[in-house]
Image (spheres, rainbow, N blue to C red):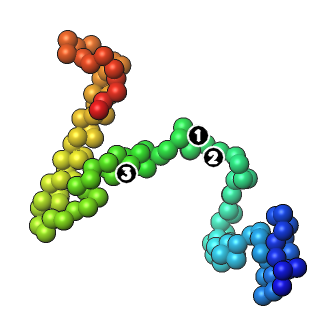
């Protein structure tokens, strides 16, 4: 049994007859479904960055991260839907105002401007 296991990243046959490492069996149905629709999959090589992710996180991921910073949204105990929607709208407004202030920091000057562009 132990002779058939993967050692040092080598691909060997498992006792069940499949491979221990390598392409996932989940990929086969996906590739056949794409081939039926005449779609050629373009999968980038491991370790290369795709053009859309060169700057870091996607805008949606970053915004979801900001929304998760509001604890009241993460653990909503409100029974009324209106209250939950209010907290969601309030969090969205706070995130939008922070973003506008952050953008204005570099384009505008005002008397009460804080020393640092970091908004706490």
Mark 2 = which residue?
50
Mark 3 burial class by Cα count in 10 Å: few <14, some 14-19, many 20+: few
Asked whether residue 98 is in view, the answer is: yes
Which label lies toward us, 3 or 1?
3
Horizontally, residue 119 falls left or right of residue 6, namely left
Residue nearest the viewer, comparing 65 with 33: 65
Residue 25 shown left or right of residue 94 in the figure: right
Q: Where is residue 41 in the image (x, y as percent from the top left)?
A: 68, 62
Marks 1 and 2 in Cβ contact (< 8 Å) = yes
| Mark before the other along the chain sequence, 2 or 3 | 2
Q: Image quarter for residue 34?
A: bottom right
Q: Is mark 3 on a helix, strand or loop?
A: helix
**Distance between mark 3 and mark 1 Cα atoms:** 19 Å
Name the element at disc 1. loop
Most distant residue in the front direction? 2
Q: Mark 3 points at which residue?
A: 64
Whether residue 108 is visible to the viewer of this picture, yes or no, is no
Residue marked by disc 1: 54
* Contact, mark 2 vs mark 3 (Cβ under 8 Å): no
Residue 62, relative to residue 33: is it above or below? above
SS class, disc 2: loop
Q: How far apart are marks 2 and 3 (CA)?
A: 21 Å
Could you tell me residue 33's position as x and y percent?
63, 75
Mark before the other along the chain sequence, 3 or 1: 1
What's the mark number on residue 75?
none
């Amino acid at each position: 049994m132990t002779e058939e296991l993967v050692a040092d990243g080598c691909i060997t046959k498992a006792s069940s007859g499949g491979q221990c490492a390598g392409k996932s069996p989940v990929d086969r149905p996906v590739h056949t479904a794409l081939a039926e629709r005449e779609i050629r999959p373009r999968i980038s090589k491991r370790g290369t960055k795709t053009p859309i992710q060169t700057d870091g996180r996607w805008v949606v991921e970053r915004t979801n991260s900001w929304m998760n910073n509001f604890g009241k949204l993460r653990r909503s105990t409100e029974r009324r839907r209106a209250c939950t929607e209010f907290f969601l709208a309030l969090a969205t407004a706070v995130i939008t105002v922070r973003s506008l202030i952050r953008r204005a920091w570099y384009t505008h000057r005002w008397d009460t401007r804080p020393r640092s562009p970091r908004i706490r």
